Amino acid sequence: MTNSIILFVMLLYFLTKFALDAIQIKYIKNMVVSEIELDKLQLNKQHLEKSNLYNIDKLIISMVSLMVQILILYVFLFGGGIDYLSLVVTSLYASEGFIFNFINQELLTLLTFFLMITLIGIPISYYKVFFIEEKYGFNKMTLTLFIRDLIVSLILSILIISFLFLSFLFLYVNFEKNWWALMWLVFIIFNILILYIYPTLISPLFNKFKKINDKNILNAVDELTNKVNFNIKDVYVMDGSKRSKHSNAYFTGFHKNKRIVFFDTLLESLSVNEITSVLAHEIGHYKEKHILKSIIINMILTLFIFFIMFKLSNMQIFFNAVGVNIISPSSMVITYSLLFPIIGFFITPLLTFFSRKNEYEADNFAKKYSNKNDLISALMKLYKENLSILKPNRLYAAFYYTHPTVFERIKKLNS
């Protein structure tokens, strides 16, 4: 019975994801955008066709990724891969004469799994960057930079996974009934710490950040921040152009470490007034407490996840149903890491709805404290330069779109 339920949920997940991609591809191919709509966005049919082809290519690689995910789940779960991995890691390191104990075995099993998943994902990442992004004129990344990013990300991930798993292992062994609540506290504190240090310690590992020194921009920034009573020391520009021609801006950090970052590609394409309107939008996220709300939502979701982990940890029938017979802390974490994204997928529409609502609120804040026409102009340029889809399928957008479309945002701004 348990096996049937799990298989049904997994099948529903894969069919839904595949259907959404297929529906979106068909929708893009049949999408009709009038000349009036194109004129409003200062676009032409050639640009629309390029945007459609770009997004179809991304959807096709998404389908390929889905098939790889199916294969991974089959091999590691129902194919007995997790059990085999546990046995191989134990025998391999024991035969090499390592000082081998329970902690080493569990951590090495988990890290070996993570490394395998990372290696499996490299060809798809490579294809996305050096074929799709290259094909449409976005890619500026070199192979050397690609490898460097991969290595740095890998090292950071290993450090983070090791800390969290060792914390879990300690609590799981020593606090039989309450480990899930204690682990939740560790996870929340750790995430808040990462959020705090990300702008100053983590992000600079990948990009260079410089304070904006353009006097016209600085004067506009000072005027806006004084108007909205927003205390921030500096606004930064990031060298996003060394990887891609895509442009963006974002708000990160909190307290004394909060900062607003513009991609250099964005500053090159927007006027001072447009930059100010984008800045007002990013400040809006802070003033409307979107970051705090997101943290609270994540706290609730992770509490639920750890509680489910606790309940399942004592259900041998559950692990046997997915092909895991050697039940250990590492095998449990690997199983959860494979299955929980499937469960999470079905609540995605609620999270994307919340995200789109936040974007409307930030737009409204920007409309109040800057010129709405400048924001509209900036949005039009962003959508044009990033080859964003103008009219996605509504069902697809409900699952995948964290931002409203350009038409929706302009309509709201003009209302």
Image (tube, rainbow, N blue to C red):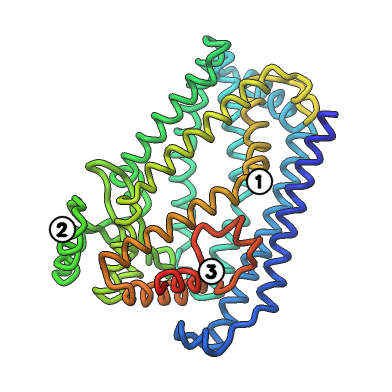
Q: Nearer the viewer, residue 254 or 75?
A: 254
In three-dimensional space, the C-alpha distance between marks 1 and 3, rounded to whole angstroms, equals: 29 Å
In this rendering, the answer to whether 105 lies above or below 241 is: above
The 10 Å Cα crowd at callout 2, few under 14, some 14 to 19, many 20 or more, is few
Q: What's the mark number on residue 226?
A: 2
The 10 Å Cα crowd at callout 1, few under 14, some 14 to 19, many 20 or more, is few
Secondary element at tag 1: loop
In this rendering, the answer to whether 395 lies above or below 273 is: above
- The quadrant of the rendering that contains the C terminus is bottom left
Q: What's the mark number on residue 346?
A: 1
- Image coordinates of residue 179 in percent, x first then y, are 53, 17
Give the residue type at disc 2.
Asn
Left or right, 310 with respect to 244, comes to right
Q: Which residue is mark 3?
A: 133
Give the residue type at disc 1.
Phe
- Image coordinates of residue 205 in percent, x first then y, are 35, 48
Q: Nearer the viewer, residue 320 or 93?
A: 320
